[in-house]
Amino acid sequence: SDPTHVRIMTFNIEDGIGIGVSTTPATATTTGSQWAYIGLICQALAPDVICLQEIKASPEQLGLLAELAGYWCYWHGAKGYSGVGLLVSERVAAERPAFAHPPFDFEHRIVTVRLPAFTLASVYVPNGGKDFAAKLAFLTALDAFAASHAAAGSPLVLCGDLNVARTDLDI
């Protein structure tokens, strides 16, 4: 397959993937409705990469949901707050790719993966309601991160919930 043509899906879980999730085999298929929905999307659209935001769960909370057949899964989150995930198809990466976090990451808000043709990031920018200065600091650091990739000639794809709106009508 052509490494420059990658089908990417991004999905803000909002209520958290860990909410109501059972980690026991007997009930894992009947709980976690968001996960079931993502599974259906994967079957129908076969995305090469899935970016998730606001998972609100630690990897340990996900239990059996932590893996999706045919994908390398990486979860970066904590119970009940924030969190991001990246799922990379084994069609795109035959071996498990290296997932990383830029130094400005806090509150489990960004995870990156280097793919053959570009670096991809799943991002969940703070909304700024509680701490607008922290949101601006995160966006400034994200801008510098993107600029460093551009300066190095390294393509970067940012996906996710950037929590920005041009006007009040966009909210």
Image (cartoon, grey):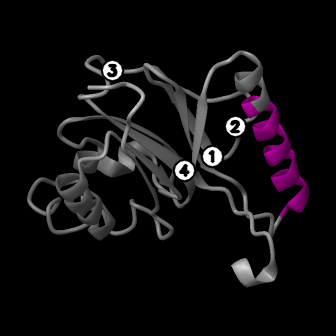
Is the C terminus in the top left, top right, bottom left or bottom right quadrant? bottom right
Position of residue 15 relative to residue 42, above or below, is below
Give the percent coordinates (x, y) of residue 80. 53, 61
Left/right of residue 63 with respect to residue 160 in the rendered view: left
Name the N-terminal-most of marks 4 and 2.
Answer: 4
Whether 22 is among the magenta residues is no
Residue picked out by circle 2: 105
Give the percent coordinates (x, y) of residue 170. 71, 78
Do we see residue 51 in this rendering? yes
Name the N-terminal-most of marks 2 and 3.
Answer: 3
Q: Alpha-carbon neighbours of circle 4 within 10 Å: few (<14), some, or many (≥20)?
A: many
Looking at the picture, which amino acid does disc 4 mark?
A: Gly
Residue picked out by circle 4: 83
Q: Which residues are magenta?
A: 131-146
Disc tally is 4
Looking at the picture, which amino acid does disc 1 mark?
A: Arg
Label pair 1/2, CB-CB below 8 angstroms: yes
**Residue lying furthest bottom in this view?**
169
Residue 96 is labelled as 3
Looking at the picture, which amino acid does disc 3 mark?
A: Arg
